[in-house]
Image (cartoon, rainbow, N blue to C red):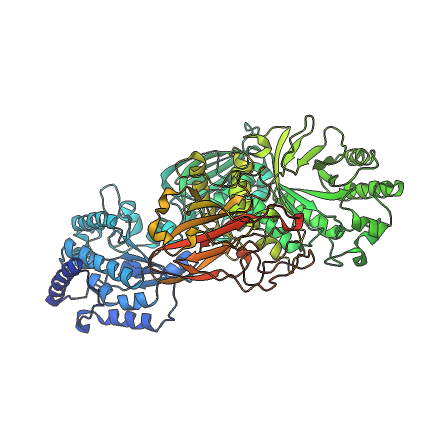
Amino acid sequence: MNRNIAFPSLYKRIVGALCMFFVLHQQVGAQIKPTNYPDSLFTTYYHQRVSMFKKLPMTQGDIIFLGNSITEGGSWGELFGDEKVKNRGISGDFTVGVMQRMDEIVQRKPSKVFLMIGINDLSRNISPDSIVKNITWIANFLKQEVPSAQLYVQSILPVNEVFKKFDGHTSKGSKVLEVNEKLRKLASSGKYIYIDLYSHFCDEQGKLNKAYTNDGLHLLGDGYMLWKHLVYPYVYDVQQKAALCPTPKFIQWRPQVFPLYKCAQIVLGDERLLQEAIQLQHQLSQKGIVTKLVNVATEGQPVIEIDIDSTEKNIEAYALSVTEKRIRITAATANGIFYGIQTLLQLMRDNVLVDVCEIADAPSFSWRGFMVDVGRNFQSIQQLKQQIDVMAAYKMNIFHFHLTENIAWRLQSKLYPQLTDSKYMLRNQGAFYTVEEMIELIAYCKQRYITLIPEIDMPGHSDAFKRAMGVDMQSEKGVEICKNILKEICTTYDISYLHIGGDEVKIDNLNFLPAMVEVVKSYGKKPVAWNPGGNLPEGTVLQMWIGDTKPKKNYPSVDSRHLYLNHFDPIDGVVTVFNHKICDTVSGDQHLLGATLCNWPDRRVSKEEDLISMNAVYPVMLTFAERSWQGGGWGNFLSDIDKPGTDRYKAFVAWEKRLLEHKTLYFKGFSFPYQKQSDIEWKLIGPYKNNGKTETVFIPESAAFMDTVHVNRFPSVWGGTIWLQHFWSPMIQSHLRNQEDSTTWYAVGKFWSEEDKEKDCWIGFNNISRSPATHSPPVGAWDNKNSVVWVNGKVIAPPVWKRGGQKGDSEIPLVDEGYEYRAPTKILFKKGWNVVRIKAPVGSFKAEWQNTVKWMFSFIPL
């Protein structure tokens, strides 16, 4: 604070008048007008700062820290590493000063305002009631001018008179408590969210902790570090404690913190962990924390220790202990230490302080895989590494690399170079992985404790082989070539497994697959194949890929049933994978190994990034990582989130919060098509028989229907994507059960808006799978079923499709057919509740594979 500021008695008179104005306003609900006080009430410095603020670029949607010198002292943009975080602190400011400059704040239409004000008022003997009423005026004015902005009122910090400075401020300890208590109670009115900083800055005597100040009032750097940590969850709308994914098996939180920003040493307890220590050191350096690797810690200094625990038997288990002075990770192997570090990195989310906790963790399944099909659509090494990095961060450990297809053969063979000749490729001609690139990719995976499993699909999916070699794989010559190829792969690459396919083909040569298994095993590798597939010897790892398949006795099993990204709608993909019970069990063993999430986009893409964005790879991958590590699940083929009050719904809500936190913190700049859906309720109205005429109008479309019918009496379903009947019904359950064709249903949902505002919305009625050659939607319609959406009684026009009416063709890429990869639909929402009405009819369920009937709808405001 500027101790030379002199406040004239005019200030007290203004405050009194303002309090009377506030009371009158509360009584009559009048429009709150900006304040206009004499310039003489404010200091020269105040005017300088306000003048500068008004000259800065008029950005919108910012996060503003507003207050006096304590706020001004924080380099908030640098602290958060976020250019949207702005400092609007002015030394010596008081509540009326903030009121006077609120016009500059509201013109920016901030998304959030963090206010701390009042200590200077107290130093001039302004009453706690007056301070609170002024803060209430600020809250009301902000809500009036920018209804969507969220105000966070931070408690006034404690003071400490021991330094014998700022006596007018540090003598007001009891008044500070009084103001804070009033602010805390008033927060229940919903005008703002109250943040208690006071209790975290107090010492045992209730004074401002001397570790955070050198004058009893203002903060040292350590104080701002703590402040950032405390408000970080509010700045980014995340949970109070770090949302860990996958969720550890055991975690116990405590209220203390470890000062990460003071940590300068990583203690290496075992030389076998040098690689992990170096990786951790690199991760810390990216957070601006410089550390040295040492064998013995400097006494009294905060350190991170990693060490081998010889008593632990599970090679992937780890223990992580955080105290106020030490973070310690132990495990039986370097693999376990690596997983402990991934958890620690999530605990370090604000790069400042780590909450004290104890964690003991181990996976439920040993096989946690992700498969990419590069035979149909080639992916660069860079994009593959991006996905592998995400896998590693979330403790997935199998990278299934599907290298060969009818479209193209993508792995270089020095024995048979013609396999990768561009003239035999139907897409991405000339694109393949060299021996050197494959070796590099395998090593890249190993550094992250991921096993790369190459797949050479045989004898099916092998048209590219036949074009290049001029023979069928099952022929005598073809068998010889295939054996040589497997030998070349097994002797060239440092791999543990080799996938030989075996699916979707008529087996004429019954000895083909057993012979290939024998070759793989002869080189010390473990064979993997698809189930259902061809005849395979016992002991072969079988990967289940179709719905009604069950694990086979004497065959280790991997689950990929209904785990195909290319068929998922992004919203229901997260739900379905969260519900999944891997291998029909809650945890694995030597027979039931785990699962692999697969990305099979048969259809050509226009650019490789579409393989990520159109298939919602990352939100579903994180959900899969959670399920395959945690185990459990609710049953296969469930596409709904159940209803509030049920255990399944509660579990999904908890997961969704963690998923969205990770989207916010770790996937900036990545495609992550997922939005909160657990709070979206629909009332389903129907069924109405339409006799195959989907354009038929029924009573819910009438203007009077919403006024005359009590919608709440209809059954509710929850979620952003609603399946009236799944296209793989009855195997996959829908929100409705056993529906007949030629039926129309209506759905009504209510969505709140703080103000009249145009909002982006995801809307869809047929999320086209990226595998079949499905037709594009008709020109001027949402789909070919005459589906309609109204918002507040107004029909919402469908997009102007770039390829409206285009007949399905696997060689024509999708461009805007899915809501998740086209521009959102912009809809004007009014202030208050907005009623969305959906018409979802269906004619016949009969359809060809390329144009499967998807009776569904999606609606989510972003």
Which residue shows up at 55% across the image and 32% down it? 364
Q: Is residue 398 visible?
A: yes
Q: Whole-percent x and y of residue 728?
A: 60, 41
Q: Nearer the viewer, residue 156 or 226?
A: 156
Which residue shows up at 78% across the image and 47% down it? 462
* Left or right: residue 150 compared with residue 432: left
Q: How many marks?
A: 0
* Left or right: residue 606 compared with residue 572: right
Give the quarter of the figure containing the N terminus: bottom left
> To which quarter of the image does residue 732 belong?
top right
Would you place residue 24 above or below residue 855 in this image? below
* Left or right: residue 11 compared with residue 485: left
> To which quarter of the image does residue 594 belong?
top right
Q: Is residue 67 visible?
A: no
Q: Residue farthest to the right?
A: 476
Q: Nearer the viewer, residue 608 or 545?
A: 545
Q: Whole-percent x and y of residue 743?
A: 52, 46
Q: Whole-percent x and y of residue 768?
A: 59, 52
Q: Residue farthest to the top?
A: 553
Would you place residue 537 above or below residue 289 in this image? above
Q: Nearer the viewer, residue 422 or 200?
A: 422
Would you place residue 611 above or below residue 296 in this image? below
> To which quarter of the image does residue 420 belong?
bottom right
Q: Nearer the viewer, residue 778 or 39?
A: 778
Q: Residue farthest to the front?
A: 691
Which residue shows up at 74% across the image and 54% down it? 432
Q: Whole-percent x and y of residue 132?
A: 19, 55
